[in-house]
Amino acid sequence: MAIAQEILDYLKLIPVLKTLPKRAFQMVYDYEADVLYIDFYNPPYSSDDTELTDNDIVIRYGEQDEIVGFTILHASTW
């Protein structure tokens, strides 16, 4: 029964995923560090620059200031 609930929890993401830009991306959650990594390219592009926002989101920029991903610190608090 616990596995079925876990699957249902993941299915809650589908409405959000439908609203995102239509391209492949990768998400990895590090439970111990409570950090969510979102990369807009697979394999991830390296970043040339980063910006830390007031709400602990690191925006990673690649060439020509293109956003290549996010790192969300303290992800479970969202």
Image (tube, rainbow, N blue to C red):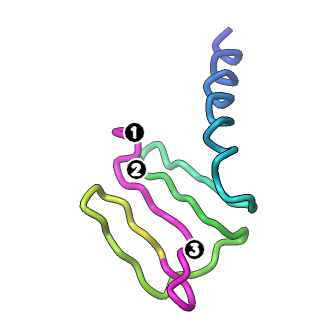
Q: Is residue 18 above or below residue 51?
A: above
- How far from the left and from the top, in percent, is residue 57? 37, 60
Badge 1 element: helix
Disc 3 residue type (three-letter): Val
Q: Whole-Å distance between the Cαs marked 2 and 1? A: 10 Å
Residue 73: percent from left, percent from top = 36, 54
What residue sits right under mark 2 in the picture?
A: 33
Q: Looking at the image, is mark 2 or mark 1 nearer the viewer?
A: 1
Circle count: 3
Q: Position of residue 60 (x, y in %)?
A: 47, 74
Of the two numbered discs 3 and 1 in the rendering, the one whose residue sits closer to the viewer = 3
Q: Residue at x 42, y 56 (%)?
A: 72
Where is residue 59 drawn, in percent x and y? 43, 70
User: What amino acid type is highlighted by mark number 1?
Assistant: Ser
Q: Which residues are magenta?
A: 61-78
What residue would you read off at disc 1? 76
Gap between marks 3 and 2, in whole Å? 21 Å
Residue corresponding to mark 3: 68
- In terms of secondary structure, where does tag 2 sit? loop
For the residues labelled 3 and 2, say whether their Cβ atoms are less than 8 Å apart.
no
The image shows residue 55, relative to residue 14, as above or below, that is below
Marks 3/1: CA–CA distance: 22 Å
Q: At 60% across and 65% down in the image, what residue appears?
A: 39
Furthest residue in direction left, as rendered: 54
Q: Is residue 19 a member of the stretch shown in magenta?
A: no
Ranked by sequence position, the earlier of labels 3 and 1 is 3
Q: Residues within 10 Å of mark 2 (few under 14, many from 20)?
A: few
Q: Does 62 sit left or right of 59 as displayed?
A: right
